[in-house]
Amino acid sequence: MNVPSEKLKFVNAIIPVADAFVTGTGVTSDIINMENYKKCTFVVITGATAVTVNTITVFAGVDNVTCATPIVFKYRTQAAADVPDAGSDVPTALAQAAVAGFPSIASIIGNMSIIEVDAADVAAGITGGDHCALRLKDTPAAAAQVGCVIAILSEPRYPQDVLATAID
């Protein structure tokens, strides 16, 4: 039987109310332990907002305390139109982000950015690295924005009925 919850681990990395994307200062997700997984996909979803550009950066680390080394990653956005308008579910092609991240235009209602993190890129970013985190920062500072980030871990190294925790 193909049961997604036995193949994917879902983590609420930034909750929508308590951690609204803060003006000027940015917000960083929980640190995700990829020790038992080969892939981590962060899904960044924004609500209705004024024009805001968030720089999205991914960091690598060796534990759940320090995760501050920026790394390369792949991403796509789904921001052709406001949700639920026609075309709002059409993603862009997968693109490579630089270590400095990429600017995500979040002025579209229901914008989704899909960030693909590979365990090999985390390990290449810092010796012994198996943890990652995502940071959103307004550039330039604009009105606070409501959004959330979900981390989806996939390709478990040791498949089992109940997947191990990813937040230490």
Image (tube, rainbow, N blue to C red):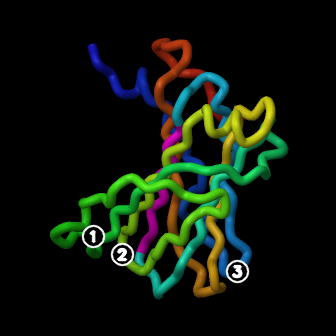
Spot occupied by residue 167 in the image (x, y as percentages of width and height): 68, 36
Instruction: Please report the bounds of the magenta region as a residue range.
Output: 40-47
Q: Residue at x 63, y 31 (%)?
A: 34
> Could you give the CA–CA distance between mark 3 and mark 2, rounded to whole angstroms?
20 Å
Q: Residue furthest right?
A: 66
The N terminus lies in which quarter of the figure? Answer: top left
User: Which disc number belongs to residue 83?
Assistant: 1
Looking at the rendered structure, the kind of residue marked 3 is: Gly
Q: Where, by quadrant of the figure, is residue 77 drawn? A: bottom left
Secondary structure at badge 3 equals loop
Q: Nearer the viewer, residue 57 or 151?
A: 57
Spot occupied by residue 144 in the image (x, y as percentages of width and height): 59, 80
Q: Nearer the viewer, residue 146 or 122?
A: 122
**Dot 2: few (<14), some (14–19), or many (≥20) neighbours within 10 Å?**
some
Q: Nearer the viewer, residue 25 or 97?
A: 97
Q: Which residue is mark 2?
A: 109
The C terminus lies in which quarter of the figure? Answer: top right
> Could you give the CA–CA distance between mark 1 and mark 2, rounded to whole angstroms?
6 Å
Q: Nearer the viewer, residue 28 or 72?
A: 72
Looking at the rendered structure, the kind of residue marked 1 is: Val
The answer to whether marks 1 and 2 mark residues whose Cβ atoms lie closer than 8 Å is yes
Q: Which residue is mark 3?
A: 24
